[in-house]
Image: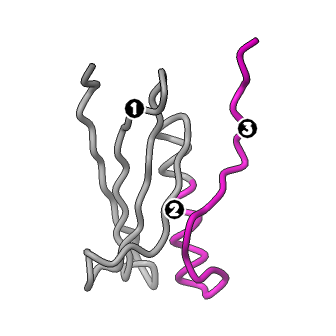
Amino acid sequence: MVGPSTETGFAMKGAAERYVCSVRLERYFRRWRHHWLVCRANEPDELVAWGHAPTQELAEAAARNQIADLASGLSKGGRVVGAVIPRLRH
């Protein structure tokens, strides 16, 4: 089954302009999740950070936080583990 084809992207102002983010909806087991990717603006093929979230809003917020951390030097990139804990089915 093919799901909705959605991909959004955004860039930030200031020092964070060096990074570009995209958010994609992807199938994950029987559910959907939003996978976000952060790349350098001058090297879009170089993946800097990535993660996933259950909603687009949470994915965009996590990506923005990661870009802010990258721009300030608090993070060096890589996979970002979210603070959202998925509910388990019983």
Residue occupied by mark 1: 27
* Disc 3 residue crowd, few under 14, some 14–19, many 20+, Cα 10 Å: few
What's under tag 3, amino acid-wise? Ile
Eyeballing the image, is 13 above or below 27? below
Eyeballing the image, is 12 above or below 24? below
Residue occupied by mark 2: 64
* Disc 2 residue crowd, few under 14, some 14–19, many 20+, Cα 10 Å: many
Disc 3 to disc 1, how far (Cα)? 18 Å
Q: Are marks 1 and 2 in contact (CB under 8 Å)?
A: no
Q: What element carries label 2?
A: helix
Residue in view at x 26 percent, y 85 percent? 42
User: Which quadrant would the C terminus be assigned to in this image?
Assistant: top right
Q: What element carries label 1?
A: strand
Q: Give the range drawn in magenta.
A: 62-90
Residue occupied by mark 3: 85
Compare marks 1 and 2 and give the one earlier in the sequence: 1
User: Which quadrant would the N terminus be assigned to in this image?
Assistant: top left
What's under tag 2, amino acid-wise? Arg
What's under tag 1, amino acid-wise? Arg
Disc 1 to disc 2, how far (Cα)? 23 Å
Residue in view at x 38 percent, y 76 percent? 19
Q: In which quarter of the image is residue 38?
A: bottom left
Q: Is mark 3 on a helix, strand or loop?
A: loop
* Disc 1 residue crowd, few under 14, some 14–19, many 20+, Cα 10 Å: some
Extreme residue toward the top, this view: 90
